[in-house]
Image (spheres, rainbow, N blue to C red):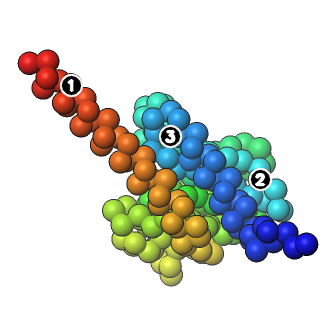
Amino acid sequence: MADARQDVTQDEIWMRQALDQAHNAWALGEVPVGAVVVKDGQVIATGFNQPIGTHDPTAHAEIMALRAAATILGNYRLPGCELYVTLEPCVMCSGAMMHARLARVVFGASDPKTGACGSIVNLFEQNQLNHHTQLTGGLMAQECGALLKDFFAERRKAAQAAKLDDSSSI
Protein backbone atom coordinates (compact mmCIF):
# COMPACT_ATOMS: atom_id res chain seq x y z
CA MET A 1 0.00 0.00 0.00
CA ALA A 2 1.41 3.39 -1.02
CA ASP A 3 1.89 6.10 1.58
CA ALA A 4 -0.81 8.73 1.05
CA ARG A 5 1.72 11.45 1.95
CA GLN A 6 4.50 10.34 -0.41
CA ASP A 7 3.75 13.23 -2.76
CA VAL A 8 4.54 15.77 -0.02
CA THR A 9 7.87 17.44 -0.68
CA GLN A 10 10.46 18.30 1.93
CA ASP A 11 9.72 21.98 1.24
CA GLU A 12 6.07 21.38 2.16
CA ILE A 13 7.11 19.71 5.41
CA TRP A 14 9.16 22.78 6.37
CA MET A 15 6.36 25.14 5.28
CA ARG A 16 3.89 23.22 7.47
CA GLN A 17 6.22 23.85 10.39
CA ALA A 18 6.26 27.54 9.47
CA LEU A 19 2.43 27.45 9.45
CA ASP A 20 2.53 25.95 12.96
CA GLN A 21 4.64 28.92 14.01
CA ALA A 22 2.11 31.28 12.43
CA HIS A 23 -0.58 29.76 14.67
CA ASN A 24 1.59 30.68 17.68
CA ALA A 25 1.47 34.30 16.54
CA TRP A 26 -2.31 34.17 16.12
CA ALA A 27 -2.72 32.77 19.63
CA LEU A 28 -0.97 35.90 20.94
CA GLY A 29 -3.06 38.27 18.81
CA GLU A 30 -0.21 38.89 16.36
CA VAL A 31 -0.55 38.72 12.58
CA PRO A 32 -0.08 35.00 11.88
CA VAL A 33 3.23 34.72 10.08
CA GLY A 34 5.69 31.96 10.91
CA ALA A 35 9.19 31.03 9.82
CA VAL A 36 11.70 28.20 10.18
CA VAL A 37 15.42 28.07 9.39
CA VAL A 38 16.71 24.74 8.07
CA LYS A 39 20.33 23.60 7.77
CA ASP A 40 21.44 20.20 6.54
CA GLY A 41 17.87 18.89 6.54
CA GLN A 42 17.17 19.90 10.15
CA VAL A 43 15.14 22.76 11.58
CA ILE A 44 17.60 24.74 13.66
CA ALA A 45 15.42 27.73 14.55
CA THR A 46 11.85 28.97 14.41
CA GLY A 47 10.11 32.29 14.74
CA PHE A 48 6.73 33.94 14.57
CA ASN A 49 5.47 37.51 14.44
CA GLN A 50 5.79 39.33 17.77
CA PRO A 51 6.04 43.08 17.09
CA ILE A 52 2.91 43.98 19.07
CA GLY A 53 3.68 42.02 22.22
CA THR A 54 7.38 42.88 22.26
CA HIS A 55 6.88 46.53 21.23
CA ASP A 56 9.53 45.88 18.59
CA PRO A 57 8.87 46.80 14.95
CA THR A 58 11.65 44.42 13.88
CA ALA A 59 10.12 41.35 15.57
CA HIS A 60 8.85 39.82 12.33
CA ALA A 61 8.79 36.02 12.08
CA GLU A 62 11.80 35.97 9.77
CA ILE A 63 13.91 38.20 12.02
CA MET A 64 13.03 36.14 15.09
CA ALA A 65 14.05 32.93 13.28
CA LEU A 66 17.27 34.49 11.94
CA ARG A 67 18.25 35.75 15.41
CA ALA A 68 17.68 32.32 16.92
CA ALA A 69 19.61 30.57 14.14
CA ALA A 70 22.55 32.98 14.45
CA THR A 71 22.67 32.39 18.21
CA ILE A 72 22.52 28.62 17.80
CA LEU A 73 25.23 28.58 15.11
CA GLY A 74 27.33 31.24 16.82
CA ASN A 75 27.58 33.28 13.63
CA TYR A 76 25.64 36.16 12.12
CA ARG A 77 26.20 34.57 8.73
CA LEU A 78 24.05 31.55 7.98
CA PRO A 79 25.60 29.94 4.89
CA GLY A 80 23.93 26.74 3.79
CA CYS A 81 20.71 27.67 5.60
CA GLU A 82 17.26 27.96 4.10
CA LEU A 83 14.40 30.03 5.51
CA TYR A 84 10.74 29.08 5.04
CA VAL A 85 8.15 31.75 5.77
CA THR A 86 4.39 31.81 5.30
CA LEU A 87 4.23 35.35 3.87
CA GLU A 88 6.40 37.09 1.30
CA PRO A 89 9.12 38.97 3.21
CA CYS A 90 9.20 42.75 3.47
CA VAL A 91 12.20 44.94 2.62
CA MET A 92 13.58 44.77 6.18
CA CYS A 93 13.41 40.99 6.36
CA SER A 94 14.73 40.51 2.82
CA GLY A 95 17.72 42.71 3.64
CA ALA A 96 18.43 40.73 6.81
CA MET A 97 18.22 37.48 4.84
CA MET A 98 20.75 38.71 2.31
CA HIS A 99 23.11 39.93 5.05
CA ALA A 100 22.81 36.51 6.71
CA ARG A 101 23.92 34.93 3.42
CA LEU A 102 21.06 32.45 3.33
CA ALA A 103 21.31 29.93 0.53
CA ARG A 104 17.58 29.96 -0.14
CA VAL A 105 14.32 31.62 0.89
CA VAL A 106 10.95 29.94 0.34
CA PHE A 107 7.72 31.83 0.98
CA GLY A 108 4.03 30.97 0.85
CA ALA A 109 1.53 33.76 0.21
CA SER A 110 2.44 36.87 -1.76
CA ASP A 111 2.15 40.26 -0.05
CA PRO A 112 0.82 42.83 -2.54
CA LYS A 113 1.29 45.69 -0.04
CA THR A 114 4.84 45.21 1.26
CA GLY A 115 6.33 42.19 -0.51
CA ALA A 116 9.99 42.60 -1.43
CA CYS A 117 10.34 39.29 -3.29
CA GLY A 118 8.46 40.29 -6.41
CA SER A 119 5.13 41.83 -5.41
CA ILE A 120 6.37 45.41 -4.96
CA VAL A 121 10.08 45.00 -5.61
CA ASN A 122 12.41 42.02 -5.79
CA LEU A 123 15.51 42.77 -3.75
CA PHE A 124 16.85 39.32 -4.50
CA GLU A 125 17.18 40.23 -8.20
CA GLN A 126 19.22 43.39 -7.67
CA ASN A 127 22.49 42.81 -9.53
CA GLN A 128 24.18 45.63 -7.60
CA LEU A 129 23.97 43.66 -4.34
CA ASN A 130 26.90 41.43 -3.49
CA HIS A 131 24.96 38.37 -2.34
CA HIS A 132 22.18 36.62 -4.19
CA THR A 133 19.91 34.24 -2.34
CA GLN A 134 17.86 31.69 -4.29
CA LEU A 135 14.16 32.53 -4.03
CA THR A 136 11.10 30.29 -4.34
CA GLY A 137 7.66 31.83 -3.94
CA GLY A 138 4.11 30.54 -3.81
CA LEU A 139 4.68 27.31 -1.89
CA MET A 140 1.37 26.37 -0.27
CA ALA A 141 0.23 29.91 -1.04
CA GLN A 142 -3.45 29.09 -0.67
CA GLU A 143 -3.06 27.65 2.84
CA CYS A 144 -0.75 30.43 3.95
CA GLY A 145 -3.03 33.11 2.52
CA ALA A 146 -6.17 31.52 4.00
CA LEU A 147 -4.66 31.71 7.47
CA LEU A 148 -4.10 35.45 7.08
CA LYS A 149 -7.56 36.02 5.57
CA ASP A 150 -9.23 34.10 8.41
CA PHE A 151 -7.26 36.05 11.02
CA PHE A 152 -8.24 39.44 9.60
CA ALA A 153 -11.87 38.36 9.06
CA GLU A 154 -12.02 37.35 12.73
CA ARG A 155 -10.53 40.71 13.79
CA ARG A 156 -13.00 42.66 11.64
CA LYS A 157 -15.89 40.65 13.07
CA ALA A 158 -14.71 41.29 16.63
CA ALA A 159 -14.27 45.01 15.91
CA GLN A 160 -17.74 45.22 14.41
CA ALA A 161 -19.24 43.40 17.41
CA ALA A 162 -17.45 45.78 19.77
CA LYS A 163 -18.75 48.75 17.78
CA LEU A 164 -22.31 47.40 18.02
CA ASP A 165 -21.90 46.86 21.77
CA ASP A 166 -20.68 50.45 22.16
CA SER A 167 -23.59 51.89 20.15
CA SER A 168 -26.20 49.86 22.05
CA SER A 169 -25.01 51.22 25.39
CA ILE A 170 -25.69 54.82 24.35
Mark 1 Cα-neighbour bin, 10 Å: few <14, some 14–19, many ≥20: few
Q: Secondary structure at mark 3?
A: helix
Q: Which label's residue is closer to the chain start, 1 or 3?
A: 3
Q: Is residue 76 left or right of residue 109?
A: right
Q: Amino acid at mark 1?
A: Asp
Give residue 135's position: percent from left, percent from top.
Answer: 59, 74
Q: Hey, which residue is sitting farthest top in the picture? A: 169
Q: Is residue 165 left or right of residue 74?
A: left
Mark 2 Cα-neighbour bin, 10 Å: few <14, some 14–19, many ≥20: some
Badge number at residue 26: 3
Mark 3 Cα-neighbour bin, 10 Å: few <14, some 14–19, many ≥20: some
- Quick one: 133 or 139, which is closer to the camera? 139
Q: Work out whether residue 169 can be spotted.
A: yes
Q: Amino acid at mark 2?
A: Val
Q: Amino acid at mark 3?
A: Trp
Separation (CA) of disc 1 from disc 3: 24 Å
Q: Secondary structure at mark 1?
A: helix
Instruction: Say above or below: 55 vs 88.
Output: above
Q: Which label's residue is closer to the chain start, 3 or 2?
A: 3
Badge number at residue 165: 1
- Quick one: 51 or 2, which is closer to the camera? 2
Separation (CA) of disc 1 from disc 2: 45 Å
- Quick one: 26 or 122, which is closer to the camera? 26
Query: The C terminus appears in which quarter of the rendering?
Result: top left
Separation (CA) of disc 3 from disc 2: 21 Å
Instruction: Please report the residue visible at 77 percent of the width from the left and 53 percent of the height from the top.
Output: 43
Give residue 141's position: percent from left, percent from top.
Answer: 52, 67
Q: Which label's residue is closer to the chain start, 1 or 2?
A: 2
Q: Hey, which residue is sitting farthest left in the picture? A: 170
Q: Nearer the viewer, mark 1 or mark 3?
A: 1
Q: Hey, which residue is sitting farthest bottom in the picture? A: 127
Badge number at residue 43: 2
